Amino acid sequence: MQGLKGFTQSGKAGADDIRRATEPRKMSSNKYSNGSILIVGGGREYHGAPLMAAFGANNTIAALRTASGNVTVAVPKGVAGAVRALSANMIVRELSANSISKGDVKAINSIRHDVIVIGPGIDADKASLLATASIITSELKAGKRIVIDATAIKALSMKAKLTKNVVITPHTGEFKSLTGIDLKSAGIDERIKASVSVAKKLNCVVVLKGHETVITDGKSFKVNVAKSSALATIGTGDVLAGIIASYLAVHKDAFESAVAGVRVHSMVGDLLAKRMGNHIIAMDVAEHIPDVLKGFDVVV
């Protein structure tokens, strides 16, 4: 494996990766033809996390023709009111209890969506993890495109049978929980090698988050190098999941969608770092996505 010094331009995520995943938006398009996203998350503690992911999707809609046109947030009924109060820009569906449960699978199946983001803010107790695994299994059987984020990664095992339509987005702690491999102090070569290995075993796309984020489908890989540490704050990973889902809702290549999403997320963070230093919050990232993406708009 090569270190960063040996990378060619094709090894680094860049503007061309955004263009590659950008599908032209037709003048005659409607919200359904531009893709539908379902975000399943929330729990007793992190009720704001699915909202952040939804804002990532919604703000991508505002700027980029590959964006989803319809976003639904499905959360436990105990936090639905809080999510509704924070934004009128999405449809909120209440699930059955105050945490994700197996009984929610049927309700989730009934909600129109091309892509599901699952994980932001879900409780990490055994019942919630089992319910999350059931939802993922159901979505796989239905052939849906899936972004598995945050707590939902803990519901996976290395024996999971995923598909190339699935993107998982672990940070190093979640990667260790899934694989047993500790990459906290690892260099880029080791991070690439471990990510590629896991992507091959799970047959999915892996986004190993960090200052040098590795994106791989087990065959190809890209590395995105951030210019600042501005995104090292709670909630920004949820926004990233929403951005990736927005690309995946229209662009069918999950690897290319993930690379584009990571690059956009990083560019917004670097832009805000120049304006605000290391004092941004996740909502700042979501709100400023159009500042980066308006230059990539394509309408036919």
Image: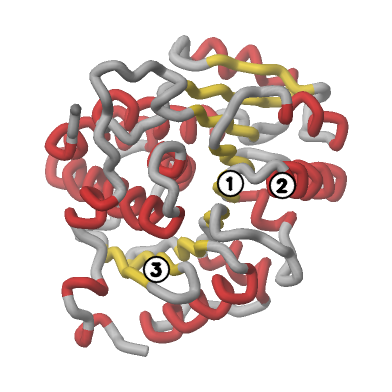
- Residue occupying the point 13% across, 45% down: 274
Please state which amino acid type lies under the numbered disc 1: Ile
Residue under numbered circle 3: 214
Q: Residues within 10 Å of mark 3 (few under 14, many from 20)?
A: many
Q: Residues within 10 Å of mark 2 (few under 14, many from 20)?
A: many
- Residue occupying the point 49% across, 16% down: 90
Where disc 1 sits, the SS reads: strand
Query: The C terminus appears in which quarter of the rendering?
Result: top left
The tag earlier along the polypeptide, 3 or 2, is: 2
Q: Can residue 234 be seen?
A: no
Residue under numbered circle 2: 136
Does 155 appear above or below 160? above
Lateral position of residue 107 relative to residue 290, left or right: right
Q: Nearer the viewer, mark 1 or mark 3?
A: 1
Does 82 appear above or below 208? above
Residue under numbered circle 1: 146
Which quarter of the picture shows residue 10? bottom left
